[in-house]
Image (cartoon, coloured by chain):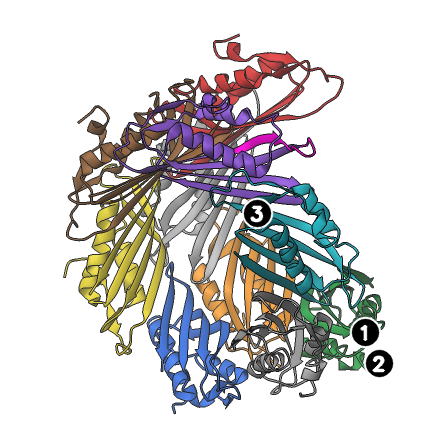
Chain colours: A green, B orange, D red, E brown, F yellow, G purple, H blue, I cyan
Amino acid sequence: MNDKSKLLETFENKYSNRDYTIIHEAPEFTSVCPKTGQPDFATIILEYIPDKLCVELKSYKFYLQSFRNDGIFYENVTNRILDDLVEVLQPRYLNITARFSVRGGISSVVEVEYKK
Amino acid sequence: MNDKSKLLETFENKYSNRDYTIIHEAPEFTSVCPKTGQPDFATIILEYIPDKLCVELKSYKFYLQSFRNDGIFYENVTNRILDDLVEVLQPRYLNITARFSVRGGISSVVEVEYKK
Amino acid sequence: MNDKSKLLETFENKYSNRDYTIIHEAPEFTSVCPKTGQPDFATIILEYIPDKLCVELKSYKFYLQSFRNDGIFYENVTNRILDDLVEVLQPRYLNITARFSVRGGISSVVEVEYKK
Amino acid sequence: MNDKSKLLETFENKYSNRDYTIIHEAPEFTSVCPKTGQPDFATIILEYIPDKLCVELKSYKFYLQSFRNDGIFYENVTNRILDDLVEVLQPRYLNITARFSVRGGISSVVEVEYKK
Amino acid sequence: MNDKSKLLETFENKYSNRDYTIIHEAPEFTSVCPKTGQPDFATIILEYIPDKLCVELKSYKFYLQSFRNDGIFYENVTNRILDDLVEVLQPRYLNITARFSVRGGISSVVEVEYKK
Amino acid sequence: MNDKSKLLETFENKYSNRDYTIIHEAPEFTSVCPKTGQPDFATIILEYIPDKLCVELKSYKFYLQSFRNDGIFYENVTNRILDDLVEVLQPRYLNITARFSVRGGISSVVEVEYKK
Amino acid sequence: MNDKSKLLETFENKYSNRDYTIIHEAPEFTSVCPKTGQPDFATIILEYIPDKLCVELKSYKFYLQSFRNDGIFYENVTNRILDDLVEVLQPRYLNITARFSVRGGISSVVEVEYKK
Amino acid sequence: MNDKSKLLETFENKYSNRDYTIIHEAPEFTSVCPKTGQPDFATIILEYIPDKLCVELKSYKFYLQSFRNDGIFYENVTNRILDDLVEVLQPRYLNITARFSVRGGISSVVEVEYKK
Amino acid sequence: MNDKSKLLETFENKYSNRDYTIIHEAPEFTSVCPKTGQPDFATIILEYIPDKLCVELKSYKFYLQSFRNDGIFYENVTNRILDDLVEVLQPRYLNITARFSVRGGISSVVEVEYKK
Amino acid sequence: MNDKSKLLETFENKYSNRDYTIIHEAPEFTSVCPKTGQPDFATIILEYIPDKLCVELKSYKFYLQSFRNDGIFYENVTNRILDDLVEVLQPRYLNITARFSVRGGISSVVEVEYKK
């Protein structure tokens, strides 16, 4: 476990006998551009089918906030969030879609998916 | 039958010779977060194909209201409503979609489905 | 024929050599809740492919108005309208979608379909 | 040819070597209800793929106006327009959708289709 | 009284002790252009403050329908409706706004007002 | 007090030391046309500044429901509701706006106001 | 009278005893840019209060069409239409608003008003 | 100070040398109907100009939550919130607008204002 | 006259005997930020009442295009356009509103007005 | 000058001979709640009439970013931004409107204005 993924708390999925879908949409994500030092803003959409564990919402909020002063590229932050959640939750399915706000007149989306 | 599912009254489906669809959308659901003790708010959408029984609407309203002061996670409340309705109605098909309002800057949806 | 279905007048479908679709949307349907005695309000959408007969619109209006002071559940009124129309029209296809307004903070839709 | 279809003038389809679609939407159609003598109002949407002939627009307008004082059911007027146009144009495909305004609190749509 | 205004039935304003406002919007008005013989279509909006009399709605509908086959200019039909209603109702205030649909690529509105 | 106004229950305005505004919007009003016997439908908007008394909402609902099978003109029902509420509440200000749905192709609004 | 204003036919305002408003909106106006020879497109909105005369709609359409191959600036065509109509109608009030579509990436509006 | 107003914490308005406006919109308010025991839902909009004190947002949230299981009329809860805030803040201006969701087919708004 | 204002061609206002309004909206304006060297984009809205002269539209387009590779602040470009147009046109009234697109996460508007 | 206001760079208002309006809208403002340590998000709208100086946009962006890790109340941050800008710019008029996103189910707006 790394420093960030340790922030993610889980609780037991009491309904692991069935597949069902959980979506968390976080429009207040912010990190820092590693090239310019300028703040980036994004909406992070997490969709997953839990196996044995669900992510606890408040700890997930703190996990996202931990990127606040990190310098990290769009592509890396999106994949990093997927990796950390997959490591902690071992889900049946997990998708991260990150919608970044306009920089230099360009808006960006990064989407990445995990299947067991 | 548990304490809550006992609240659910049914009436005979007089048209069980055919498949048809019933949708009830309840935008005034509220329960309490088990971590923070803070109230949660959600819209609960129930869609089902009845077999021998239909849920009586007023009793379903009281059933939903019974969660008002319960501390329960989003994922559990959604699955619990599905389980209680499946137990009582023994439907041919049943889906619960729960849309939770913003907490810590994050909005959430949980969706679960039952097929006979 | 029952008391209500007798209200439904028909006229000959002069174009029964082909399939075509007729839709009647009635936003002013009202009946009474059998549990509470309170009035219910709904929009009734009828869609059908006629065989030998079409329903005459004014008689259909009177048929819908005949429920005005009846105590009847959402599910039953929707299926009843389907049954009465199928009995009288013997159509090739018929669908009833009933959208009920908010009761106890919950809005409801019932949808039922007939195929020859 | 009947009295009304004689009003429909045509011109040669110079591009009959290919399929293409023509749509005419007429929101000012009016006829009379045969039951009540009251005026009916509709929007008539004609969509067709011509073969050898196209309908001349001004003659089509006069054709639609010829129903102004006729007593005729929704279902019949819609099918009648289809039949007259098919007879005169011999098209590859033709669809009539008629949207009638509210009568007795009920709005209606009739849709009929012809394929060669 | 002329032939048309005779169609307008009234009923006693039981609340003439106070000023209040009545609006009737009729989107299905049709008459005929005196120049071209082509049908015209309009929405007629009547707003008035009654004195001793109110116009009965069904008779007002028949009054508007009586223009169906009359050849009359936009400006004249609007003023004529005002004059007939003022003659019959003797209201405290009355306004007619007529919105005519497109003719020759031009849409038109005529508005006229009466104050006691 | 008449038969209907007796249905209106009140409760003490505990804040009569100040002016404040209460609005109740009821989209499910229905009565019967005294000419045709057909049902009418309306949205009734009540806005008032209370003096010593407020109208209790459930009793106001029953009061509006009491018109369900009455034959009464639009103009009279609107003024009647104003008069009954003014008699019972003796408010500082009260306004009734009634929006009636389409009859004979015509929609109607009646608005009336009371000031102490 | 000039060549264009001669196209404008009038009819007697039978209701000159009162002020009332007439609006004609013509979205299909086209002329030619005197600099580039490119076609211009505009919506011409005429609003006036007639005195003794009203403009006949078909002649007004022909009048507007007479600009089709004229090379004329936006500002001049708008003022010219005002002048011609004022000359012919001698109205109590007249306003021309011309909305020109995009040329060289720029859209334009010209508005001019006449009062007796 | 009463039991509820004691929940309201304040902080010093460091900018009391000028007038400025603070708005807090709370869409998750819920209390209980004193007649039926059923939950009510509302959006509470607070707008004020502070004098010496501002309301601390988290304590205001707890204050609103304290009504969760109270039986109280719409009119009283709205005035009560105004009184408690005025008592604690002694503001220069304060307005409460409460929008209640549909009960018995009726939606309601209560608005009250305080000026020093 | 400066280098840019020389680009602005005019034509005689043949209707200077009256006040009227001309609006030109140009959504394709671009210049360069003097600090960063990055391109800026804006919509320039010009509204004026001409005196003796009108601005010729094509020359105005070339005038706006002349800023394409200039490094100039938002505030200066907006005032500069006003000054150049006032110098050339000597209008009775002139207003420039410039809406700049997002830069560094910030969108900007500058508005300036001239009256004779 | 304080630590933050020193970040604000200005440039000479070359058009101080006239009043004109500048608006900068910044939707990506973030600071930290002094009570909870949680991040807050807001849109900051600055509107001003400059006197001798204008604020340089990039420095204003850095100024806003300097609040990123500060713990500060909504009311104070809004007034602080006003004070710093007034100190540096000495404008003729300046207004700050700050729209904060949802916290604890409550959204907030603070508005403050300065006039010379």
**Disc 3 element:** strand
> Label 1 is placed on what type of residue?
Asp
Q: Amino acid at mark 2?
A: Asn
Mark-to-mark CA distance, 2 and 3: 61 Å
Q: Residue at x 45, y 64 (%)?
A: B59
Q: CA distance from mark 1 to mark 2?
A: 8 Å
Image coordinates for residue E57, horizontal then vertical, percent: 27, 37
Q: Are marks 2 and 3 in contact (CB under 8 Å)?
A: no
The amino acid marked with disc number 3 is Ile
User: Is residue D37 found left or right of I109 in the rendered image?
Assistant: left
Q: Please report contact status of discs 1 and 2: CB closer than 8 Å, yes or no.
A: yes
Compared to H47, does I11 lie above or below?
Answer: above
Residue H102: quadrant of the picture: bottom left
Q: Is residue A18 left or right of residue E27?
A: right
**Place of residue H39 in the rendered image (x, y in percent of width and height, measured from the top left):** 43, 71
Q: How many marks?
A: 3
* One can see residue E104 in this view: no
Residue bearing mark 3? I23
**Picture disc at residue A2:** 2
Q: Chain for mark 3?
A: I
Q: CA–CA distance between discs 3 and 1?
A: 56 Å
Give the chain letter at badge 2.
Answer: A
Secondary structure of the residue carrying tag 1 is helix
| Residue H32 in picture, x, y percent from top left | 40, 74
Q: Which residues are magenta?
A: G26-38
Residue G28 lies within the magenta run: yes
Q: Is residue B88 rendered to the left or right of residue I65?
A: left
Q: Nearer the viewer, residue G81 or I37?
A: G81
User: Which quadrant of the structure image shows residue G109?
Assistant: top right
Q: Which residue matches tag 1?
A: A84
